[in-house]
Image (cartoon, rainbow, N blue to C red):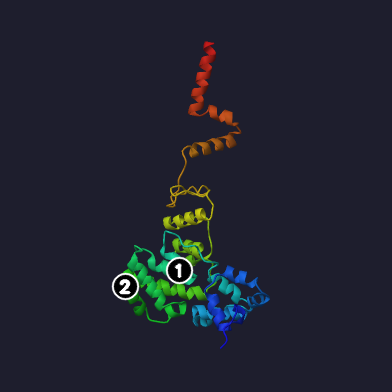
Amino acid sequence: MQKPNSLEELPRECLITVLQAVGIIDWGNLSLTSKYFNKLIKDDSLWKSLAVAKWGPAVETLAAQRVPNGGWLAYCSHRMNLTAAPKSPLDLGQEQFQDPWEHLVCCILCSRTTGGPLIRATINNFISCWPSPTAVLAPTEDVLIEAINPLGLQINRIRALRSMSNDFLAKDWLSPSEFSGCGKFTADSWRIFCRGHRSLEDVEDKNLRKYLYWVLNSSGNRGSEGPNKGDKRTGRTKDGKVTKKKGDASKTRGRAEQQKKGMGSSTVRRYTARGIKKDFRRRTRSSKE
């Protein structure tokens, strides 16, 4: 059998295997390289085949009837990562799983744990044994519960995991926060590692903020916050706590008084404690003179 000299010569099945591992942005870049790939990316049947290959035959039972003709591209695009997120020295557990479904599995399994070597090994083993939503939905709960015994809260985790896997394929979801067992941390982590979100605004988890700070600084955005500083737009520290600068409250009250009374800034200063003292000293000096 003659070896192919380019991706264009690969059999369709092999090409689908290759494309499962790359992000949507990479798909788009690939379509710009030749007319062949530009035409291929518009082939809706290819996207349906990719969905079944990537997430298992449950796609056909849970989603096939809901996806309109020509809609498989949009279906897959929302459920695949945009592009690979950079690995950081922080070595967060989520960094190892940038496929969106695997990433959500990791977040559900690692929540309320220490994140130590045993936890990571358990998560890696689970995803290796059940690598798709179809695989997770197939066995009984008891089999899955036994596999994550070191994590604790096994019943709750497995039920959340199976519910998420079903809804991941079956529903027209916008954010993982819509899934059972997936809160703000999971949604933020998915946005950062799977959708390329790079803003510190509204991200509260301290480890996610540290990762974003590392990404922003390593990419040359030196104007971003430091390790102990917060987001200027939100007034939050790296730990997500709201902070206020000294004097902010008095400035706000001063502006409110100006708007309410129609006074100028010099007039308002006269009615503050500091302004009254200055006015008193000025008048005292005038009387002595």
Is residue 75 visible in this depiction of the protein? Answer: yes
Q: Quadrant of residue 286?
A: top right
Question: Which numbered circle lies on residue 127?
Answer: none
Q: Quadrant of residue 67?
A: bottom right
Q: Which element type, helix, strand or loop, lies under badge 2? A: helix
Q: Position of residue 1 (x, y in %)?
A: 56, 88
Extreme residue toward the bottom, this view: 1
Q: Position of residue 239 (x, y in %)?
A: 42, 52
Q: Position of residue 250 (x, y in %)?
A: 49, 36
The residue to which callout 1 is attached is 97
Q: Please tell me which residue is depicted at 49% across the width and 73% down the height of the picture.
A: 168
The residue to which callout 2 is attached is 149
Amino acid type, residue under disc 1 in the picture: Phe
Q: Please tell me which residue is depicted at 43% across the width and 70% down the height of the picture.
A: 105
Above-or-below relation of 264 to 200: above
Q: Position of residue 236 (x, y in %)?
A: 47, 49
Extreme residue toward the top, this view: 289
Nearer the observer: mark 2 or 1; the answer is 1
> Which one is earlier in the sequence, the residue at label 2 or at label 1?
1
Amino acid type, residue under disc 2 in the picture: Asn
